[in-house]
Amino acid sequence: MLNERVDTAALPLAVGDLIAILGVLTIGMVQHGTLTPDRAPGVYAPFVIGWVVGALLIGAYSAGAAESAKAAIPLGLRAWVPAALVGFGLRATAVFPGDLAVIFVAITFVLTGALIAGLRWLFFKLIG
């Protein structure tokens, strides 16, 4: 089943996806003065876990994703929806640092989605 959900030709897209997810979270921690080596992994983990779940569930790295931006961008955005829900749900627990303020949810959801789409578009512009 994993072979149907992950095509190695699409795996380079994962670099941009992780840059988008971790980048937004890092910028937030920098802006709030909370970026520390002991805190950052706990901030990243819910959304990385969510991304693994969402990407596999939706097929963000399926064979179609490697074909064109027209295919890759919607797959990335559709994967981000359940990924974000998992990430926000985990962050709302006492296990992970931070809170779940409405503004955090809105900014993280929209900005990360835009960056996932933008970096997937850039990937296909660069590789032709």
Image: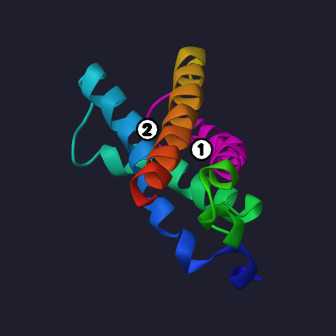
Residue pointed to by mark 2: 97
Q: Amino acid at mark 2?
A: Pro
- Residue occupying the point 63% across, 47% down: 73
Q: Is residue 95 visible?
A: no
* Image position, residue 68 (x, y; %): 62, 57
Q: Which residues are magenta?
A: 73-99
Q: Is residue 125 visible?
A: yes
Of residues 67 and 18, the one drawn nearer to the viewer in this rendering: 67
- Under circle 1, the secondary element is helix
The spot of residue 4 in percent (x, y) is 75, 79
Amino acid type at mark 1: Gly
- In the image, residue 75 lies in the stretch drawn in magenta: yes
Q: From the viewer's perspective, is 51 left or right of 123?
A: right
**Is 45 placed above or below 61 here?**
above
The main secondary structure of the magenta stretch is helix
Name the image quarter holding residue 6. bottom right
* Res 61 → quadrant: bottom right
Give residue 87's mark: 1
For label 2, the SS is: loop
Horizontal and vertical percent position of residue 57: 75, 62
